[in-house]
Amino acid sequence: MNESAFINCGQAPVQSCFADAEGIAGLHPEVAFGGERMTDNDPPWLRVMSFNLHVDWPASPRPWRERRNVVAHLLRMERPHLIGTQEGLHGPLRDLEADLGPEHYGWIGQGREGGSRGEFMAIGYDRTRLRPLEYDHFWLSGTPQEPGSNTWGGGWTRMVTWVRFHDLSGGGELLAANTHFDDASAYARDCSAELLAERLNTLAPDVPRSSPVTSTPPRATAPSTRRS
């Protein structure tokens, strides 16, 4: 279950897309998405993508080394202004930074175990469209400022990364929050949703917001036996 909540604080309409890095393994980038391809229909459009990279674990039947090129090609083709990733480890995220070019895309995030350890809820942004103003992280637990904390019985540690941006094209500000809810505990998901709503109300109390985006893209290949 992947949740990426994006709040539109500026004037630009949002065009969203969902991707699954495990599901696109072996596919040509032109047919990798379940939804419509992003286009440059109108300059004000803000193209937003939620992308589950799928964690690169030792026994994975689809290791990152086999997916890296098609993922990078897909992102170059779609050119999202804002990317919220799930399950990306430090190494694959550094690969994406190199493949897309650090002069084109900036990345903000940290591992859910703290620092570079564990999966990131990273936010990538097009440097020509968005400029970060401030950012922070919190954990989906009863002690949200404690890295790696998990107090609600979830199967895994969960966290949120948020960034406030200035829209260089449309003007105004945009607050983006990226997260990945627990798949094992309904109680942990309920508590996570309450905390996320509370924090977003504090961060952006008086701005219009979009509904949370739930990314459950159709799979083009059989799902992995590992869940996180």
Image (tube, grey):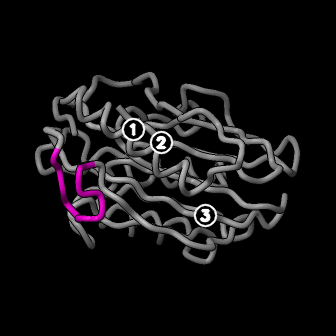
In the picture provided, is 184 more to the left or to the right than 159? Answer: left
Alpha carbon of mark 3 to alpha carbon of mark 2: how far? 16 Å
Question: Which circle's residue, 1 or 3, is located before the other in the chain?
Answer: 3
Image position of 122 (left or right of 58):
right
Query: Which tag, 3 or 2, sits closer to the chain's start?
Result: 3
- Does residue 7 appear to the left or right of 194 in the view shown? right
Q: Quadrant of the C terminus?
A: top left
Image spot of residue 211 (x, y percent): 59, 32
Q: Secondary structure at mark 1?
A: helix
Q: Nearer the viewer, residue 36 or 210?
A: 210
What residue would you read off at disc 3?
164
Dot 3 amino acid type: Arg
Circles 1 and 2, Cβ within 8 Å, touching? The answer is yes
Residue 94, given in percent of the width and then of the height, sits at 39, 69
Residue under the image location 46 percent in, 27 percent down: 217
> Which residue is nearer to you in this view: 139 or 194?
194
The image position of residue 142, as x and y in percent, is 23, 50
